[in-house]
Amino acid sequence: MSLALDVAAGAVGGGTSILYAALGETISERAGIINLGTEGCMLVGALTGYAVAAMSGNPWIGVVAGAGAGGALAALHAMLVIERKASQLASGLVMLFLGLGITSLFGGSFVSRTIHAFTPIALPGLSRIPGLGKILFNHDPLTYLSFLAAPAIWWLLFRSRWGLLIRGAGERGEVLAAYGYSPKLIQYLAVVAGGALAGVGGAQLSTAYANSWFEGMTAGRGFIAVALVIFAGWDPLKAVAGAYLFGAALALSPALQARGYALNQFALDALPYVITILVLVFLSRKRLHAAPEGLIRTLANAPVR
Amino acid sequence: MSVISSALRPPKLRSAGREAGRLALAFAGALVVFGAFVIAKGANPLTVYSDMVRSTFLNSNSIAGVLVKACPLILGALAVAVPARAGLVNVGGEGQIVIGAVAAGGVALALDTHLPGGMVILLMMLAGAAAGALWAGIAGLLRLTLRVNEAISTLLLNYVAIDILLYLIYQPWKDMHGSGQPVTRQLAVAARLPLIGGTQVHFGIFIAIAATLVIWFLMERTSWGFRLRVVGGNSEAARRAGLPVSALLLSAMLVGGALAGLGGMVHYAGAELQLRAGMTANLGYIAFLASWLARHKPIRVAVAALLLASIAVAGDSLQINSALPAATVNVLMGLVLVAVMGGWGLRKKAVVA
C-alpha cells in the first residue's frame, strides 16, 4: 500500500482521540473556560475506559466509564475556576497532575491486562471505494462515531438553543443572567461535557487505537487538542481537519520506519508539536478575533506589543 | 493593580499568619482526601504518613534530597514568576529546564576534560541560561509579533525540547563506553558543582537563593520591576505612559527562560551529572504551580518551591515503604493545590484576572 494512503488512514485512526478532546475543549472554550487539564481528562478516560473494559468484558461500557471519569475531573476544574475564581491555566495544570497521579496509582495492575478491545470494522460497500475506503471506512466504531460527533457538536453550538446559551455564557454572561439563565450552570455543563469528550478520546486511545494501557500514554495529545481548538477558530468542523493533521504527523513516523526509511525518529516525534506551533503562527493573527470574549480575557491577558 | 491591593491589605504580620493557617488547613484537607486514595489501594494511610514524615524530615539524607530538588524548582518557579508579573504565562519551564541542561551538557562533553573545573562551571551556567532564554524567547517573539498565545506555545515547546534531549542521548551524545543505556557520560568530577559539607547538597542551592534575592530586588526595588508590574497591570496605560511595552515583555520572558535554563544546568551539574531521559521529572510543571501558589512574589515563590520539593521527595518514600508507584505523589501534590486554590481563590481574584 502506498505511503500516502497508509499515513492518511493512520491520520484518521490516530487523530480520533485528539478530535474527541478538541471537540470537548471547543464546547468548554465556547463557554469561556479553557481547560489545560484536557490532558489529565484524557489520561483518566484512557485508564478508566481500559480498566472497565477489562473488568466488564465490554469496551462500550469502558468508553462510558471513561467519559464519566473525564467529566468528573473536569467538574473539579469547573468548580475551582467558576466558584473559586482560580486561574484557569493553573487549575488546568493541577488537573493534569491529578490525572497523572491517579492513573499511576491505579493503573499499574492494568499494564499487562489484555482486553476485549474495539476492532476495526470495514463498512460494507463504502470500504471498497478505492483510496477513501481504506482511509475513512476501515476503522473502530469510536472513529465512526466521531464522524457524527463533529457535525452534531457544530449543530449544537451554532443551531440549537443550547448552543446560544453556551456561546452567550462565553461572551457576555451578564446578558444571560439578565434573561434569567444561570451562566455558571451553563459553564459547568460545558466544562463537564468537554471533559467527558476528552475522556472518550482517552478511551479511544486505550481501547481502540493502542489496545493497551501504559503510564502517560496520552503524551501531550490533550495539550495539542487545546492548541488545535484555538487555530480551528473554535469551530468543531475545522477541528476535524486539525486533528487529522496531527494524526498524520503521528502516523508518519511508524509508516516511514516500516518502509525502512532512515529518517530521524526524534525529529519525526517532535513534528506534531512543531506543526502545531507553525499553524498557530500562520493562523493566529486572524483567529484570535473569533475567540469568545470571555476567553480573550484569559488567553490575551497579556498585552500584545 | 498591585499597588491598590497592597494598600488594602491588612497589616503584614496578621495576613501572613492567616495565610499560614489557611495553608495548614488546606494541607490537612488534602491529606485526608489522599488518605482515602491510599485506603483504596489497600494501604494504611497512618502508616504511609508516618513513613513519609519519618523518611523525609527526620532523615538527614532526605532533607538533603529536598534541598537538591529545590534548586531547579526554585529557579524554575522564578522563571514563571518574572513573566507573570508582566502578565505573561510561562508554562514552558519544563522545556527551558531541559534545554538548559542540554546546553550545559554540551559544554561539559566538549570541554570538561580540557579546561579547569571552575571555568567549565561558569561556561555551563552561561550556556544553560542562554539556551533557556532562547527557548522562552521563541515564545516571547511569537507572542509579540504574531500574537501566538505564549501559554500554548511554551507548552508545545516543552515537547520539542524533550525530543531534542532524546535525540542527543540516543545518538550523537550517547556514552559509548557505558552500559548501552541512552545516557551521556558522567560529568568530570572537577566540573561538578561542589558538594556542601559531605552531604549531597550542592552549591546550586546558593545559586537558587542568590537568584531569589536578585529577582526580589529587581522586582521590588528597580524601575524595571516596577515597569513590568505596570505592563502586567494595564498594558494600555503603560503604552500611553510611553513605556516600551514590547521590550519589557520580551525582557521578562528572556529573564524567565534564563532562570529556568540555569535551573536545568544546576540540576545537571549538581545532581544528575549526566543527561538521561526523564531527568527533569515534571520539575517545570511543579515549578509553575509553585509560582502560582505564591502569587509570583519571589521570596514566597522560593518557599513554595521548597514545600513542593519536600512533597516530591516524600513521594519517594511512598514507593520504598508502601510499594505505591512514585507518581502517586502527583495526586497529593494536586490535592494540596486544589485545596489551596479553592481556599484562597476569592482573595486571589484581583491577581489572577
Image: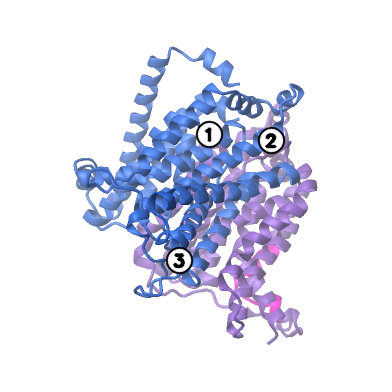
Residue ID for mark 1: A86
Q: Is the Cβ of the residue at disc 3 closer than 8 Å to that at disc 2?
A: no
Task: Give the x, y percent position of residue B73.
Answer: 42, 43
The blue-tinted chain is B
Give the distance between the C-alpha atoms of the residues marked 2 and 1, in whole angstroms.
Answer: 29 Å
Instruction: Please identify which colour was used for chain A in the image.
Output: purple
Which segment did they paint magenta?
A134-149
View extreme (front): residue: B115
Left or right of B74? Residue B251 is: right
Residue B329 is one of the magenta-drawn residues: no
The amino acid on which the numbered mark 2 sits, given as a three-letter code, is Ala
Label drawn at residue A7: none
Number of other residues with Cα within 10 Å of mark 3, as a class: few under 14, some 14 to 19, many 20 or more: many
Tell me the chain of label 3. Answer: A
Q: Report the Cα–Cα distance between label 1 and label 3.
A: 32 Å
Question: Is residue B291 depicted above or below B153 in this figure?
Answer: above
At label 1, which amino acid type do we have? Ala
User: Residue at 73% across / 84% down in the picture?
Assistant: A125
- Residues behind callouts 3 and 2 on a single chain: no
Q: Which mark is residue A50?
A: 3
Residue type for callout 3: Tyr
Label 2: chain letter? B
Which SS class for mark 1? Answer: loop
Please tell me the numbered disc located at residue B247.
Answer: 2
Corner quadrant of residue B164: bottom right
Number of numbered discs overlaid on the protein picture: 3
